[in-house]
Image (cartoon, coloured by chain):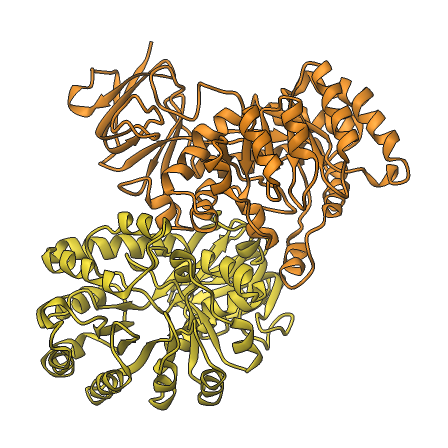
Chain colours: A yellow, B orange
Amino acid sequence: MSSVLVTNVGELTTNDSTLGDGSMLGLIHDAALVIENGQVSWVGDRRLAPPADRAIDAGDAAVIPGFVDSHSHLVFAGDRAAEFAARMTGHPYAAGGIRTTVSATRAATDETLSINVAHLVDEMLRQGTTTVEIKSGYGLTVADELRSLAIARQFTEETTFLGAHVVPPEFVDDPAGYVELVTGSMLEAAAPYARWVDVFCERGAFDGDQARAILQAGMAAGLLPRVHANQLGPGPGVQIACEMGAASADHCTHLSKQDIEALSSSGVVATLLPAVEFSTRSVYPDARALLAAGVTVALASDCNPGSCYSSSMPLCIALAVREMRMSPGEALWAATCGGATALRRDDVGHLGVGAKGDFAVLAAPSYLHLAYRPGVPLISSAYAAGRRVA
Amino acid sequence: MSSVLVTNVGELTTNDSTLGDGSMLGLIHDAALVIENGQVSWVGDRRLAPPADRAIDAGDAAVIPGFVDSHSHLVFAGDRAAEFAARMTGHPYAAGGIRTTVSATRAATDETLSINVAHLVDEMLRQGTTTVEIKSGYGLTVADELRSLAIARQFTEETTFLGAHVVPPEFVDDPAGYVELVTGSMLEAAAPYARWVDVFCERGAFDGDQARAILQAGMAAGLLPRVHANQLGPGPGVQIACEMGAASADHCTHLSKQDIEALSSSGVVATLLPAVEFSTRSVYPDARALLAAGVTVALASDCNPGSCYSSSMPLCIALAVREMRMSPGEALWAATCGGATALRRDDVGHLGVGAKGDFAVLAAPSYLHLAYRPGVPLISSAYAAGRRVA
């Protein structure tokens, strides 16, 4: 038994609407929380806090649940900074650029890949992200997808098999053959290391029929579905996600009214990735239409070397507010509880009793500063299961 | 005599086009530099570096000149996060909001103001900013402007008298009386603590005639002029800056062709503050038109509690690239050498021989990552005159 009291919290975001101000964020001022054996055991007014083995003084700063980044691609090698610079001076983003990273990833040692992931996970912790989903998808051979997931699994339970990221060069004349590989021996090798199956359903990647086949095979192998949907243009991705009961449809940049209705009636989370739109100079998703329709919205980074090499959830919040007209509170909720919902997790993304003790202390008096102070490193410390991790 | 060798620099940006690749950035790969008594005494190929008393190993990372943030308002008290949140959900930015901060600043103790500045300057150092200009302008009485500048002077030589920030409430019916105060006893009290005089020439603040009178009085008192120009709409600010030989016209969001021609022919620096446009959901300045006309462009933060509470020069670079179509190299130059030019400084903003040893080590192999990785804290350490400061 070991307990820790986090006290002198100027503003605590619990994401439990039965607490504090009763809002979606369940804000408590002059708050404290107690974490026992890694879980929140008490939360409330700091003057009423029970004793604990040790104490952390938040110095009147704001405390928020650790960010839940439900979409990232961290297992890769190589550098695409020059491609980024070219894109910014006039060359549009195309899914084919993924193949550059595939070559570098295949050529890298396990150790290099593992060091790269460790570096990015650490960078995320320093920015307050305590839960991260990590996809494969830069290997695209049985052996390279397998090792990508085995490496990812060293860092998170939330691993996603994305053999269907793009058709690799050696299958360019035989995409059906690649789908057969993905749904056959590649899936068989990957499944023990993955919780999720995902597909990039997009022109230039996989079409609707291919996406269905890949998700169905993944589900038959015991994986849960999620979909890269409607990023670069309208398409069937969101509808497929809804049909198949995916946990989340990610991107949702180009949606029809029917897509929004399908998300709303199915309960599939719309995971928005605004740092991608920032980094590819794209239009942004219509978050307000989604929220108005009652869709659950999550924010995630999509950290990857091509379309978005940002690991910053605070930037996602600032962009959600500036570019998608989410309120700062909606954005914080989406980056925490929204991400947890997109991963079907009820133990993270909030700080109600029973939640994991994953939280970040801000160098600011209120969560509002995450949007109010864009670009400023505002995470002064981060904790996972009550232990300091950054 | 004390010398330090900075070696194993994977990519060194010198901003000296006679060095390295001969570009505007004067990039040297596998570089080193030597700093003696606070100044760069040698720069070049690391294999040829002379010995020094001690060494810093940059670990093959990129090294850049410390950022020169030539426009900030750090002397204030109070919090306007709620105003920001309201603005993001529909209320436009208005200059009048400045008065909220004026009340809080007047009510604050010297110690509170000083602690606030120290906190923000430290935050800037951690983000690689080693030279910062700080304005007064939230006091707006003789005593409060005087103490604002005296506090700013504790942190930087680049202090700016901005009594003409906005007409304070007690002069709302007598703006001419306020201009008389600013150009009279307030200027007299402020001048010993200021290098620069500035005026917010904008509808809702000071008109062209008032701006001219204020700048002329400041210049007669030995101060150098700079101007807040053409931020919220077209206006005479840029033309006045050019007429009066200001070092810089800041904002430049709404320019006519004549304004661009005047900047080009006068040599006045156009200081762009894109984090303001981000934080006020404004259109961005036309950086490409300015660059095409041969205007010297600087980037600065405008860190202030109202229109832009970001101190992040890396964010300014990312926004300049994404939103204003500057290349990553143009943006880095503008955030370093451009800022130095806007402050008429030739000892900072570059790392040629004779420059101050002010630099930042990036957690990245190239300066390109400043734009490629928006929001990510990429400054691993910062040095001023060869001494580690963050």
Which is nearer the eye, B84 or A201? Answer: A201
| Tally of marks | 0
Q: In this rendering, is residue B84 above or below A49?
A: above
Splitting the image into 4 quarters, where does residue A109 fall? Answer: bottom left
Q: Residue at x 44, y 31 (%)?
A: B336
**Outermost residue to the top:** B1
**Residue B20, image quadrant:** top left
Q: In the figure, A354 relative to A276: above or below? A: below
Instruction: Tell me where residue B181 appears, x and y as whole percent.
Output: 83, 26
Instruction: Tell me residue A292's x, y (percent).
Output: 58, 79
Q: Is residue A35 left or right of residue A294?
A: left
- On-image quarter of the N terminus of chain A: bottom left
> Looking at the image, is B45 positioned above or below residue B102?
above
Q: Is residue B386 left or right of residue A34?
A: left
Q: Is residue A180 above or below residue A326?
A: below
Residue A350 in picture, x, y percent from top left: 48, 70
Across and down, in percent, residue B309 comes to 58, 46
Residue at image coords 79%, 26% = B182
Residue at horizontal 16%, vertical 83%? A183
* Towards the viewer: A387 or B371: B371
* Residue A60 appearing in the image: no
Q: Viewer-proximal residue, A71 or B87? A: B87
Residue at the farthest right position = B173
Is any atom of residue A187 visible in this view?
A: yes
